[in-house]
Image (cartoon, helix red, strand yellow):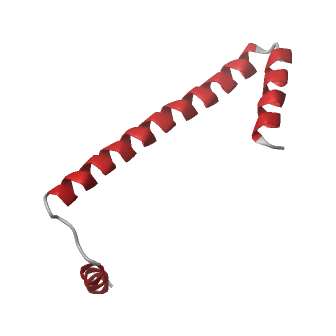
């Protein structure tokens, strides 16, 4: 099933469902998923900002520096 087919089937199933507990559970699952996506988005934005700040302040390492650091940790 592709994404469109899954969405269509979910819509059909939700429309035919009359049990409020099941509908509530589905709502919670989908709502939680949307919240997690927003948290991930904010984390990615924060990391990108930090990376840009590091680059602007010349806090970067070349490949040799990274390899040396990795070797020291192992």
Tag count: 0
**Residue 62 horizontal/vertical position (percent):** 26, 77
Which residue appears at 67% of the width and 19% of the height? 24
User: Seen in the image, is 28 located left or right of residue 21?
Assistant: left
Q: Please, which residue is most extreme toward the front here?
A: 56
Res 54 quadrant in image: bottom left
Answer above or below: position of 57 versus 62.
above
**Residue 68 horizontal/vertical position (percent):** 26, 85
**Residue 9 horizontal/vertical position (percent):** 84, 29
Q: Nearer the viewer, residue 26 or 61?
A: 61
| Quarter of the image that includes the N terminus | top right
Answer above or below: position of 26 versus 72.
above
Res 29 quadrant in image: top right
Q: Nearer the viewer, residue 73 or 54?
A: 54
| Quarter of the image that includes the C terminus | bottom left
Q: Please, which residue is most extreme toward the left here?
A: 57
Which residue appears at 31% of the width and 44% of the height? 46
**Residue 41 horizontal/vertical position (percent):** 43, 40
Which residue appears at 81% of the width and 28% of the height? 8
User: Seen in the image, is 62 located left or right of residue 20?
Assistant: left
């Amino acid at each position: 099933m592709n994404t469109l087919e899954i969405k269509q089937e979910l819509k059909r199933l939700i429309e035919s469902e009359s049990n409020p507990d099941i509908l509530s559970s589905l709502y919670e699952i989908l709502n939680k998923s949307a919240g997690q996506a927003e948290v991930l988005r904010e984390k990615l934005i924060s990391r990108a900002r930090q990376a840009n700040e590091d680059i602007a302040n010349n806090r970067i390492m070349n490949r040799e520096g990274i390899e040396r650091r990795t070797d020291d940790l192992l």
